Image (spheres, rainbow, N blue to C red):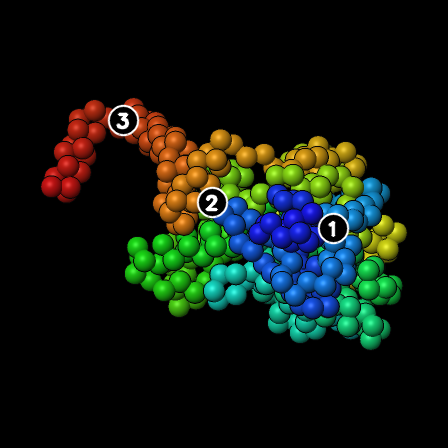
Amino acid sequence: MEDIKGNDIMTTKICKEGLCTACGACETICPKKCIERVSHTDSIVMEKGDACIQCGLCENVCPVNNKTRKNTPIHAYMAYATDDGIRKKSASGGIAAELYGLCLNDGYYIAGAEMTDTFECHFKVTNHKEDIQGFQNSKYTYSFLDNTLKVVKQKLDNDEKVLFIGLPCQAAALRNYLSTTKTNTENLFVGDIICHGTPHPDYLKEHIQSISTKTGKTIDTCFFRDPKYGTQNYVFSLYHEQVKLAYQSKVDKHDLYQIGYHKALIYRECCYSCEFAQFDRVGDFTLGDYHVKEVDECDVDIVKKSLILINTPKGKEFIEKAAAKNSIIILERPLQEPRAGEPQLRRPSVAGPERTVFLSEYEKTKDFDKAAAIAFKRIVLRRKLKLDKTILSAKMVVKKLIPRKLYRKVKVAIKGEEN
């Protein structure tokens, strides 16, 4: 085989191009520390560096090359945290935050993803309760595992208990790494999150910088589902000085990042062929939003509800133990309900034709907003026309309700104010 330079050695690629999730398992296990992260327009891939000794550990630990065991869910629960404050700050029913808190009380270490002040998402392993807030709410960008796999192994080797909650590709990386290093995982509990896909981390940073330049505000805080407006409403908010609003856009408006993410146009290449977007799962349990709108037999007056899939006996014991402490409520539902209601339990996301245009423009400009403005032009136009129709319809209703003479006077007065 040849590397990309044509030398007669093993390829620098660790797994098939277009499938690498950049989980970092290969990077963590490499004895020579020679695995390199290579950034492309639509992906981050792991490649071998010049110091490679061809030991094969990177290929063996890779979840793409060596499939991680998956389990078919055995139970489905609609669930929510009993604490209103936790639900308010969480993306859905607050289950992950409550599980983290309960585990800390029982002496666990917890692993989750938080946003940094540079608007990158990085994992942390901690036993401090104040870190839970950073793990809450959605982060619609690629997350770096950094040294998480190694730290989790160290904790397990020291007979510590660990709760890890991450994307299924990250959970698979952890499983493979611990199996390859022959680590005892009796004290490990793994939750995987239902994932639609994750964009290249540069996209978000460039978008926020563009908004910062336009507004003249130094952005320091980002929400994809701002708790202030109800996380179920997917309000994208940027703040300066942490509490002063600098920019805001609802999910159905014109923000280019919101459009790109929710229309599945800006994910990394591997996300569109994701092997984990299926009903069989890697984690002991799976968390997500509960999308089924009608639940006749157990309807509850809670706006935001979580989905929990139980995938292993270990996961069942873990969740039932948490529910017994009354911090979370779990209501069993038929397994076919979430399977039918959540597309990512059946297939990976599918991109529209705008993605090809976006990648072409981004390759030329290396500027997210410039590329997205061209690629998503028709989507933005359709939304503006829809908004205009809504305004026009409202005007017609007002015109019918107000006497004609009064309507004319109001109209004249408004025009006078505008002039």
In three-dimensional space, the C-alpha distance between marks 3 and 1, rounded to whole angstroms, equals 63 Å
Of residue 3 and residue 114, the one placed in the foreground of this image is 3
Q: Position of residue 114 (x, y in %)?
A: 58, 63
In three-dimensional space, the C-alpha distance between marks 1 and 2, rounded to whole angstroms, equals 30 Å
Residue shown at the point (37%, 38%) measured from the top left: 374
For residue 63, the mark is 1
Q: Position of 366 compared to 107: left or right?
A: left
Q: Position of residue 203 (x, y in %)?
A: 46, 51
Residue shown at the point (66%, 51%) measured from the top left: 8
Q: How many marks?
A: 3
The residue that label 2 is drawn on is 258
Residue shown at the point (49%, 61%) measured from the top left: 119
The kind of residue on which mark 1 rests is Pro
- Pointer 1 local density, CA inside 10 Å: few below 14, some 14–19, many at least 20: many
Q: Position of residue 232 (x, y in %)?
A: 55, 47
Instruction: Work out whether 232 lies above or below 403.
Output: below
Furthest-front residue in view?
A: 8
Quadrant location of residue 57?
A: bottom right
For mark 1, give the secondary structure: loop
The kind of residue on which mark 2 rests is Gln
For residue 399, the mark is 3
Q: Position of residue 91 (x, y in %)?
A: 59, 52
In three-dimensional space, the C-alpha distance between marks 3 and 2, rounded to whole angstroms, equals 35 Å
For mark 3, give the secondary structure: helix
Residue shown at the point (78%, 47%) measured from the top left: 67
Number of the front mark, 3 or 1:
1
